Image (cartoon, grey):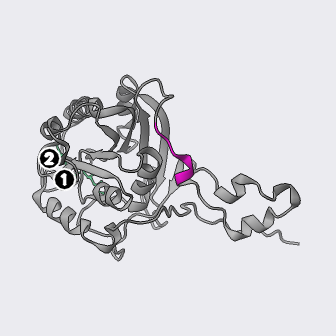
Amino acid sequence: MPAQHYENKVFNEDAVIGLNRIPDGSVDLIIADPPYSLGKDYGNQSDKLNTADYLSWMQLWIDAAIPKLKPTGSFYIFLTWRYSPEIFVMLKQRLQMINEIIWDRRVPSMGGSVRSFTSVHDTIGLFVKGNGKGYYFDLDAVRIPYDAQTKKARSRSIFVGAKWLEVGYNPKDLWSVSRVHKCDPERADHPTQKPLEIIDRMIYASCPPGGLVLDPFMGSGTTAVSAQRCGRRFVGFELNPDYCAIIQSRLAAPYAQPIANNNQPTEPVRAKISRAV
Ligand SMILES: C[S@@+](CC[C@H](N)C(=O)[O-])C[C@H]1O[C@@H](n2cnc3c(N)ncnc32)[C@H](O)[C@@H]1O
């Protein structure tokens, strides 16, 4: 199918069927945020499968999606601890695993589980095609600038002109980014919307400018918005027609317009420990 028939489009259809629209070997980056099997209401039954059906459905769409990647392509998948062990094992038989990223949702400390530790993170897997050596990864695009206080503390002569101090440090695999709150301007009417800050970082790091990002489960369209504002192309699928309408209105919002590379620090600034005397 010619690229103009699917590029920068979100199709209101089942991803397993829709993936046939996309030529094999044409996608730079897949960002997949599938249902987690937690019983959420997406206006369909997709998050309400039993364990066996869920795991075989995950394998079905993963096997339909992977051939779409270029040899330099990358694949991020959002999961929870419940099924990440099974799904990581499945993916490791098909791709090279590069990272397990922990997304700390910065859940405030108020009550929580009483018979277990309160879960406050999502698990994200980063996998790549091939032998794990030829994949695209632009570290400079996602470096985190040092704050003025740290730069000042490193002002001794041995640090002057140090490249790492000027360009910033490379992000770690713990990403502390707040959930999208109700009062946030980017908030949409979707129960599991992901923050743009997270998706921007994945796209800057793992998709070249102008490249193609595929999201099989668009939800409120965070991947489409992020790709558009970061100067990449997108394609994706979403079962719920109401969410497809939300995606179109989000793509027209001010925050969806092109931005300069402005990845911001995502780690909480730690107060200095002051010793009592
Ligand atoms: C976890 S949400 C994605 C949220 C999205 N990342 C965001 O930031 O808004 C998963 C979405 O997948 C959709 N979905 C479930 N099964 C699907 C399928 N087979 N094909 C396409 N979309 C599907 C659901 O309707 C839901 O909106």
Q: Of tags 2 and 1, which is closer to the observer?
A: 2
Q: Crowdedness of circle 2 by 10 Å Cα count: few (<14), some, many (20+)?
A: few
Residue at screen point 28% across, 72% down: 253
The reply to whether dot 2 and dot 1 touch (C-beta < 8 Å) is yes
Please indicate whether residue 227 sits to the left or right of residue 146 in the image: left
- Tell me residue 227's x, y (percent): 34, 55
Residue in the foreground of this view, choosing between 269 and 96? 96
Say if residue 45 shows up in the picture: yes
Above or below: residue 142 compared with residue 150: above
Query: Which quadrant holds residue 87?
Result: top left
Residue in the foreground of this view, choosing between 209 and 166? 209
Look at the numbered disc 2 and give the secondary structure of its residue. helix
Q: How far apart are marks 2 and 1 (CA)?
A: 8 Å
Query: Which quadrant holds residue 15?
Result: top left
Q: Crowdedness of circle 1 by 10 Å Cα count: few (<14), some, many (20+)?
A: some
Residue range highlighted in magenta: 136-141
Q: What residue would you read off at disc 2?
A: 5
Residue in the foreground of this view, choosing between 10 and 193? 10
Inspect the image, locate mark 2, and give the three-letter code of the amino acid beneath it: His
Instruction: Determine if the magenta segment contains residue 137.
Output: yes
The quarter of the image holding the N terminus is top left
Q: What residue would you read off at disc 1?
A: 9
Say if residue 32 shows up in the picture: no
Residue at screen point 27% across, 33% down: 68
